[in-house]
Amino acid sequence: MIFHLAFVADWNAARAVGEYTVSTRGASLADVGFVHCSTAEQWRGVRERFYADVPVADLVLLSVDPTGLDVRYEPPAPGVEELFPHVYGPIPVSAVVGENALQVVAFPDTSWSESDLDVLPDDGHRYEIVDGSLLATPLQSDVHQLVSANVLMVLRTSASLSFRPLHSIGVRVPGGSLIPDITVLRPGVARDVEWSEAEDVALVVEIASRSTRVTDRTLKAAKYAEAGIPSYWRVDADGTVTIHTDPDGLDYMRTQVVRPGERLRVAAPFPVELDPASLVD
């Protein structure tokens, strides 16, 4: 998915004719030769640099499916090293799979709380609270999603006694609200709740990525231990699994590491045969 910030008036005009031909603010496709677009990580910077003076009510964020479009990743201007997606040719209205009004977020005066998360945009980022600070994680890469899906499948096929392995649900910890990549809930806990209590959790799993590996290894490990969550797994991009158990204060007392080429039978919260090499296939 790629993104384009458009004026509402320009987008309305495009819908009337079936295609979008504005390149960027003040320039058309005919002027530039392509339509400027952004990735999920880039569009906010574009908004701040080029549209900061424009009321949010006058803008719309278009989510564009690049399938079938001539998309080239190029520097947007001479001397710029960062690559942006450029669409060569008009964007058919049918390729726009989402249109989202921008939101004005009222930041809290003191510190963030769980209720403040409700004002943040549903833009694919993961927003968490740690000791009053906001922790934002970018969209997951394809490798991250693959490893996460494989771990979840292993847990679901191994789960017994009504344990529930779930993807990206909220967990309350002391001083924070976190969203592990995978959470295994104990049997019999309440269903259909927005945030689960730590005592209802048997296992949390984080899939490490470049943007999260330090946080997963330090801050989150400490918070999960403080919450008394019995087991915390950290899975690296190569499939290596680090298993933390026996929480005591801000740390886990026992750590095991199983690497690709090795196998390990994990007993808790239920028997699981871990084969790290299979997690990246």
Image: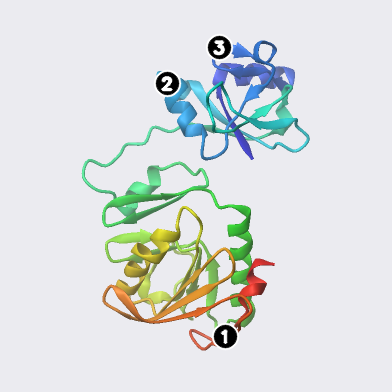
- Front one among 77 and 145: 77
**Residue underneath mark 2:** 55
Q: Earlier in the sequence, mark 1 or mark 3?
A: 3
- Measured Cα–Cα span from mark 1 to mark 3: 60 Å
> Dot 1 corresponds to which residue?
264
Quarter holding residue 1? top right
Crowd rating for badge 1 (residues with CA inside 10 Å; few <14, some 14–19, many 20+): some
Residue 199 at x, y percent in the picture:
36, 76
Tell me whether circle 2 and circle 1 mark residues in contact (CB < 8 Å).
Answer: no
Q: Which mark is residue 26?
A: 3
Q: Nearer the viewer, residue 126 or 163?
A: 126
Kindly identify the amino acid type of the residue bearing the numbered disc 3.
Answer: Gly
Q: Quadrant of the C terminus?
A: bottom right
Foreground mark, 2 or 3, reads: 3
**Which residue is pictured at 31% across the width and 75% down the height?**
251
Q: CA distance from mark 2 to mark 3?
A: 16 Å
